[in-house]
Image (cartoon, helix red, strand yellow):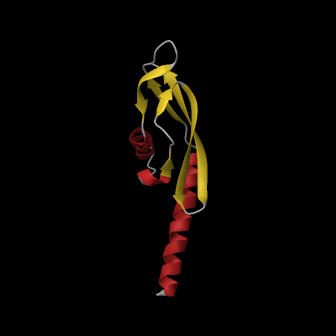
Amino acid sequence: IKEKNKNKKEKKLEEAKNIIEKIKSLKIEFSKEADEKDQLYGSISKKEVLEQFKQNEIFIHSDDIDMKNPIRTLGEHEISVSPYLNITHTLKIKVNKN
């Protein structure tokens, strides 16, 4: 049983490393409507970020994404992605005016 658990953990760790490698090569950009103060009409949520990941064949859980708050302004924003314990990558998301 211990051996089986160890193999599962190693497999998950390897999958997490592969996910991080895919994420490193990923550029996420959104085009949204915004006012003259660069405030978005609405926001970008985890759900939209997850959808971008899925379109690039990166499948992670919502809990693996650390966004303090939804993105509400234009420009570059950073989020953390952590698909496995102690494996984290900071990803920049760019929001352009539509």
Q: Is residue 40 above or below residue 19?
A: above
Residue drawn 53% across the image and 79% down it: 6
Is residue 42 shown left or right of residue 67? Answer: left
In this rendering, the count of numbered labels is 0
Quadrant containing the C terminus is top left
Foreground pick, 73 / 9: 73
Q: Is residue 52 left or right of residue 74?
A: left
- Evaluate whether residue 85 shows in this view: yes
Residue closest to the far bottom: 1
Residue 59 visible somewhere in the drawing: no
Which residue is outermost to the top? 36
Q: Nearest the camera: 52 or 82?
A: 82
* Residue visible at 46% across and 25% down in the picture: 31
Q: Residue at x 48, y 33 (%)?
A: 71
Residue 56 higher or lower than 93, as above or below: below
The answer to which quarter of the image holds residue 41 is: top left
Instruction: Name the residue at 41% across, 46% down.
Output: 54
Q: Residue furthest front?
A: 68
Residue 12 position, x and y percent, is 50, 67
The answer to whether residue 95 is above or below residue 23 is: above
Q: Position of residue 52 (x, y in %)?
A: 43, 40
Q: Position of residue 42 (x, y in %)?
A: 39, 26
